[in-house]
């Protein structure tokens, strides 16, 4: 792998695994699917021509997950009509059912401390004051961390042409 492929892999792999896990509900299988996407793209030499690798990788992982679900009889059946067209000029727009996996991916892209503050606020429903006390930081730091996290997530969502906030 070249340095740029390694960088892309290291930057996106954990988030892509979270994204795939929320779709297939199997962490080990999700990791295998994400690794297969990277291997296939590397073998086909696709990394050099990627303008927006993050959106493209999300699209590829999503398709790989749907392929897995469709082929696995014990899982939820995904109908062909529900899958987007996979042409060269495929639209990477996300739908409402993509919100949870996409948010999982976006949260995984946050720095560790910011991710912890976001988790305590949005998932554990802690107040900013409770978060500040728990992490031994100021309320203002919590506000700044949340503001920055939401701003980063909005920017990433805008890149995916999917506005949630």
Image (cartoon, rainbow, N blue to C red):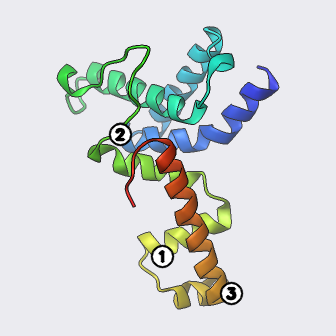
At a point 63% along the width and 77% down the height, the residue shown is 144
The image quadrant of residue 90 is: top left
Element assignment for label 3: loop
> Relative to 20, is 53 on the left or the right?
right
> Relative to 53, is 4 on the left or the right?
right
Which mark lies nearer to you, 2 or 3?
A: 2
Element assignment for label 2: loop
For mark 2, what is the residue? 94
Cα separation between marks 1 and 2: 25 Å
> For mark 2, does the 10 Å Cα neighbourhood hold few (<14), some (14 to 19), or many (20 or more) residues?
some
Please provide percent x and percent y for residue 30.
Answer: 47, 34
> Relative to 33, is 144 on the left or the right?
right
Confirm whether residue 105 shows in the render: no
Please provide percent x and percent y for residue 156.
Answer: 53, 49
Residue 121, which numbered label?
A: 1
Confirm whether residue 10 shows in the render: yes
Task: Tell me which numbered mark, 3 or 1, is placed earlier along the sequence.
Answer: 1
Task: Tell me which numbered mark, 1 or 2, is placed earlier along the sequence.
Answer: 2
Task: Tell me which numbered mark, 2 or 3, is placed earlier along the sequence.
Answer: 2
Quadrant in which the N terminus is drawn: top right
Quadrant in which the C terminus is drawn: bottom left
The image quadrant of residue 138 is: bottom right
For mark 3, what is the residue? 136
Cα separation between marks 2 and 3: 38 Å
Please provide percent x and percent y for residue 99.
Answer: 35, 50
How many marks do you count on the picture?
3
At a point 37% along the width and 56% down the height, the residue shown is 164
> For mark 1, does the 10 Å Cα neighbourhood hold few (<14), some (14 to 19), or many (20 or more) residues?
some
**Front residue (pair 162, 77):** 162
Which mark lies nearer to you, 1 or 2?
A: 2
Q: Which residue lies furthest to the top in this view?
A: 44
Element assignment for label 1: helix
């Amino acid at each position: 792998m070249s340095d740029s492929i390694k960088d892309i892999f290291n930057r996106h792999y954990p988030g892509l695994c979270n994204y795939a896990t929320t779709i297939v509900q199997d962490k080990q299988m999700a990791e295998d699917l994400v690794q297969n996407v990277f291997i296939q793209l590397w073998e086909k030499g696709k990394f050099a021509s990627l303008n927006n690798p993050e959106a493209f990788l999300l699209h590829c992982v999503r398709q790989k997950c749907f392929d897995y679900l469709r082929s696995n009889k014990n899982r939820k059946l995904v109908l062909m009509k529900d899958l987007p067209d996979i042409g060269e000029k495929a639209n990477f727009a996300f739908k409402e059912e993509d919100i949870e996996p996409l948010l999982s991916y976006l949260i995984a892209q946050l720095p560790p401390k910011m991710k912890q503050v976001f988790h305590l606020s949005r998932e554990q429903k802690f107040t900013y004051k409770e978060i500040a006390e728990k992490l031994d930081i100021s309320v203002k730091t919590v506000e700044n961390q949340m503001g920055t996290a939401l701003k980063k997530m909005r920017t990433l969502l805008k890149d995916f042409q999917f506005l949630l906030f």
